[in-house]
Image: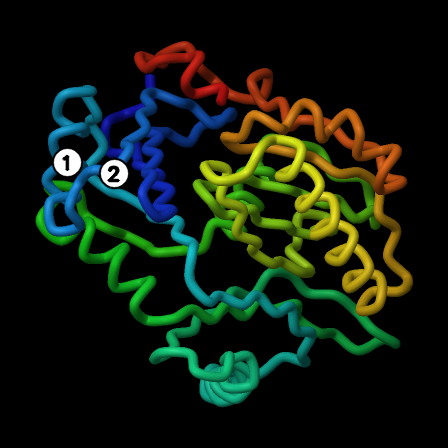
Amino acid sequence: MTRMANRVLGIEYAGDRIKIVEVGFARKLKVFNFAIIDNRNVAPERRTEQLSHTLQVRGFLAKDAIIATGGGNTEHRLLTLPPLSMREMHFVMQREAKKLASTGMAEMLWSYDVLKAKEELGIRKNQILLVTAERPMIDAAQNLMAQSRVKLQQVTTIPEAVLNLLRQITPWKKDAVRTIVYFAGAGVHIMFAQDGTLLLSREVHIDSADTGQDEQAARLSNELKRSMLYFRQNFPQAQLDQIVFSGDNDILSAFATRSSEELGVPGSILRFEDNLDISGFRGNWDEFRL
C-alpha cells in the first residue's frame, strides 16, 4: 500500500474550473481521488476557502500539491546547448527568456529543465526546456494555496503536466512526433512532442458557452492546421505520427473521428485507464474519465 507521505495532489487551475487528483507513485501511477470545482459563481477571494472545503469533504489526504496553470502568456522553448556551468546556464536562460517575452507582457518569470543529453557531430549537447510565464498567472496559483492546509511544492504549466503524465503512461514511437490536443476550461493546448520531449506548444481560447459544436470543431480544425503548418516550418524533418485528444469537451469523439480526413493524420482519444492503478480509487470514476 502507498504510504500517505507519498501521496501528492495534482491541481489543474484553468480559470473558473479546478480539477484535483490525488496520486501516489509506484510501479504504476496510483490514483486515489478526484474532484472538479466549478468556480464561476465563487468570488476570487473565496476560492481558497472553496478548495479547502472540497479537500475536506471529498476526503483528500495528501499534504503536498503541484499546480498546473494556464490562461496567461506562457512560452515553451526547447534549446540545445553544450554543457555549461550553473552561472553560464543562468545567464543564457535569462537572455533567452527576454527574447520570448511578449510585447506588453506583465512582469515575467522563467525556469528551465535539463531534459537529456544528445550528440551532434560528435559533440555532447543538452536539451533544455525553457518556460516563461507572466507573474500574475503564477501569483494567482500561489494565492489559491496560500491559506490551504496543503503545502504547495511546485507551480508548472498545463503542457508540462500533460507531457509528464504521457511520459509515464504511454509508449513513444522512436523519432515520431505526436500531436496532443488537450482541453482545459476555455483553453485548448496544442502540443507537439517527440520521445516525450515538448517541441512546441500553443494555447487557443474557445468559449464553448457562446458557440455550437460545429463552430467549435471548425475553429479547432483551423487552429490545428495553422499549428501543424507552423510546426512543419520549424521542424521540416519531423514526422507527424498521430493526434491524441484529451480533456473535458463534448466534441472530442466527433473531432477525433474526422481528424484523419481533415488533417491527414490519424486521430484518437487518449485512453489511459489500463496504465493506472485504481485499486484504491474512492472518487467518481465516470467524472474522472471525462
Amino acid type, mark 2: Asn
Give the crowd class for mark 2: few <14, some 14-19, many >=20 residues within 10 Å: some
| Placement of 190 over or under 169, stated as above or below | below
Amino acid type, mark 1: Gln
Give the crowd class for mark 1: few <14, some 14-19, many >=20 residues within 10 Å: some
User: Which residue is disc 2 drawn over?
Assistant: 39
Query: What colour scheme does the image use?
Result: rainbow
Relative to 133, is 88 on the left or the right?
right
| Placement of 157 over or under 23, stated as above or below | below
Looking at the image, which residue is at 83% across and 46% down? 176
For numbered disc 1, what is the local secondary structure? helix
- Residue 64: image location, x then y, percent: 24, 42
Sequence-wise, the earlier of marks 2 and 1 is: 2
Q: CA distance from mark 2 to mark 1?
A: 8 Å
- Residue 7: image location, x then y, percent: 30, 32
Instruction: Kindly identify which numbered label has been placed on residue 50.
Output: 1
| Placement of 125 over or under 17, stated as above or below | below
Looking at the image, which residue is at 48% across and 65% down? 74
The number of numbered discs placed on residues in the rendered structure image is 2
User: Nearest the camera: 114 or 20?
Assistant: 20
For numbered disc 2, what is the local secondary structure? loop
Q: Nearer the viewer, mark 2 or mark 1?
A: 2
Looking at the image, do the residues carrying marks 2 and 1 touch, with CB atoms under 8 Å apart? yes
- The quadrant the N terminus occupies is top left
- Residue 115: image location, x then y, percent: 60, 61
Relative to 102, is 108 on the left or the right?
left
User: Nearest the camera: 279 or 78?
Assistant: 78
Looking at the image, which residue is at 51% across and 65% down? 113
Q: Quadrant of residue 231?
A: bottom right
Relative to 45, is 65 on the left or the right?
right
